[in-house]
Amino acid sequence: IRDDLVTGVQTCALPISPYVTQTLQETKNTNEVLKEKDQRFAIDVAEAVICNSRFTANQVKSLYKRQPEVMHFGLPMEKLQFPEKTAIAEKYNGEKLTFLFISRIEIWKNLHNIFLALAQLKKKNLTLGDQLKIDIVGTGSFLEKYKRLAQVLNVEELLTFHGFVSNDQLSEFFNKAHVLLYLPYEEPMGLVPIEAGLRGVPTLGSSVDRKSTRLNSSH
């Protein structure tokens, strides 16, 4: 927080998310984000810099030569809706395997490679539409482009774009899904895989450059 922008602030902590570091790497001076020099100034004068993962902390250290503190994600457990254990088991007896993709619809979220994989599978299995479906939840600047790509690849019958949904609706999607798809480029693990795991939904993910954060039995 710059002293010339916020009066009376003597000390501050600057939280850095994956999207900030992504923006700094991809975006030059624009009206939507702080200029890179302002970001560097803010990090230099901040008393503490906080990141939500070791991955992001390493990015910040690499870019700005400043070692951040790590504060991991938390979830409002009292507000989440969880199915009964019997319901989790019963949903695997359905006719179609249901995949779930929850994210901003941007290029670095890697949705296009899911479409390409579906197109390859469909060439080998013409009845793929009877066996699986993918619910896509979220909106973003690439939404319409991805809808057109699905048509070009002839996989639109396997996909349902739901756009933005409320938190209550998110619970419904989690509880119906068999597998969560989480395949972003150059991002740490976010809240979505954690929420899926709490609901008994396994995550199919990727490890780009072997930098992704992983869960094990003790974390």
Image (spheres, rainbow, N blue to C red):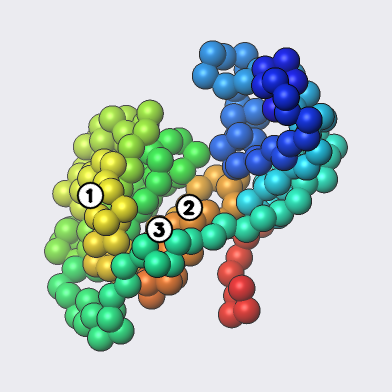
- Give the alpha-carbon distance from disc 3 to disc 2, as whole Å: 6 Å
Residue 183: which numbered mark, if any?
A: 2
Residue 127 position in % (x across, y down): 15, 62
Q: Which residue is mark 3?
A: 181
Say which quarter of the image contains residue 124: bottom left
**First-in-chain label (1 vs 3):** 1
Give the left or right position of residue 43, taking residue 147 as reference. Answer: right
- Give the alpha-carbon distance from disc 1 to disc 3, as whole Å: 13 Å
Q: Amino acid at mark 2?
A: Leu
User: Residue at horizontal 62%, vertical 79%?
Assistant: 218
Residue 9: which numbered mark, if any?
A: none
Position above or below: 132 against 64: below
Does any portion of residue 200 appear in the rendered image? Answer: yes
Label 1–label 3 contact, CB within 8 A: no
Position above or below: 33 against 219: above
Say which quarter of the image contains residue 76: bottom left
Residue 170 position in % (x across, y down): 30, 56
- Give the alpha-carbon distance from disc 1 to disc 2, as whole Å: 17 Å
Label 3–label 2 contact, CB within 8 A: yes
**First-in-chain label (1 vs 2):** 1
Task: Label 2, secondary structure: give it.
Answer: loop
Does any portion of residue 124 appear in the rendered image? Answer: no
Q: Which residue is mark 1?
A: 159
Q: Nearer the viewer, residue 186 or 172?
A: 172
Q: Amino acid at mark 3?
A: Leu
